[in-house]
Image (spheres, rainbow, N blue to C red):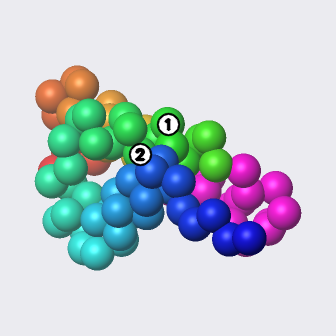
Amino acid sequence: MDVGPTPEDAERIRLLRKVTSTKQAFNQMTLDELKRLQFLVEKKDYTHNKKARRSKRKLLRSINARIYELEEGRSIWGA
């Protein structure tokens, strides 16, 4: 019996598609969207797949850096 994606899964997928569409889309995400995506990605278990775990860590690093930029009001890379 296939239950299908939960509402949280659907939201995570929607936000991930937005992130991966373009670099500009990632930079245009609001702080609330980034924090929600961070929560949803951290919650998702990827222990069964080594490549997915690595991608998760890389994505979380990018999200954390962008959240820092938005909260501090500046870019950490000087751009």
Q: Is residue 78 left or right of residue 16?
A: left
Quadrant housing the N terminus? bottom right
Q: Position of residue 75 (x, y in %)?
A: 21, 40
Instruction: Judge the density around disc 1: few (<14), some (14-19), many (≥20) Cα neighbours within 10 Å.
Output: few
Q: Is residue 58 magenta?
A: yes
Which element type, helix, strand or loop, lies under badge 1?
Answer: helix
Q: Which mark is residue 37?
A: 2
Instruction: Judge the density around disc 2: few (<14), some (14-19), many (≥20) Cα neighbours within 10 Å.
Output: many
Q: Which mark is residue 39?
A: 1
Quarter of the image holding residue 46? bottom right
The residue at 46%/41% (across/down) is: 38
Compared with 68, 34 (above or below) is below
Q: Is residue 73 left or right of residue 2?
A: left
Farthest bottom residue?
Answer: 21
Q: CA distance from mark 1 to mark 2?
A: 5 Å
Do labels 1 and 2 touch, CB within 8 Å?
A: yes
Give the total of numbered labels: 2
Residue interval drawn in magenta = 45-59
Is any atom of residue 65 visible in this view?
Answer: no
72, 48: nearer the viewer? 48
